[in-house]
Amino acid sequence: MKRTYLATIVLLERMHRQFLEVIKAELEGHDIRDINNVQALILYNIGGDEMTVGELTLRGYYLGSNVSYNVKKMTEHGYLHQERSSHDRRSVRVKLTEKGLELSRLLEQMFERHVEAVAGSIDEEKLGLANESLRDVERFWLQQLGFGPRVAEFSRVETAA
């Protein structure tokens, strides 16, 4: 069991890095150089929503210290619009600009291509079983952190169909 558990952890980490490389290749293929793969994924997860940086952190499981930096960079490059909340001046709300929406649509097209391609090589039932297993691991890790048996919210990428 130990070997299998550790192999799962290594596989998850490697797959995450490879997924970010896929996004990077997509950006480079469209000659987009003013945003990195992590920032593009953050934009995709914001989509058409407007949210606070704190909500973004919770929704996307991004490290809090990096989100503020990434939001600043995406704002500087015209992908995001920031606005202080009129109700709570400490809170900053973000939403995509037209440039950000264009990039989000580009990633949506990439995911559509992936779904078409993966449908021919991976059985949907097997993929569903893999997701169930990964949710079990996630639930276990949340329990180790004292969050009990509840399942965390999933980002748009995890729930996109």
Image (cartoon, helix red, strand yellow):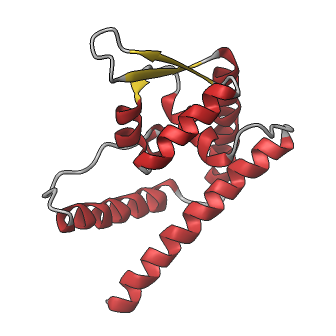
Along the viewing direction, whichever of 48 and 75 lies nearer the viewer: 75
Position of residue 59 measured from the top left corner of the image (x, y, whole percent): 38, 39
Position of residue 58 measured from the top left corner of the image (x, y, whole percent): 34, 41
Vertical placement of 3 versus 84: above or below?
below
Vertical placement of 99 versus 138: above or below?
above
Quadrant of the frame with the N terminus:
bottom left
Residue 79 in sight in this render: yes
Along the viewing direction, whichever of 20 and 51 lies nearer the viewer: 51
Along the viewing direction, whichever of 54 and 28 lies nearer the viewer: 54
Q: Is residue 120 left or right of residue 33?
A: left
Residue pictured at 81% horizontal, 37% vertical: 32
Residue 62 in sight in this render: no
Position of residue 44 measured from the top left corner of the image (x, y, whole percent): 57, 34
Vertical placement of 157 versus 20: above or below?
above
Residue pictured at 16% horizontal, 56% vertical: 147
Q: Is residue 79 left or right of residue 136?
A: right
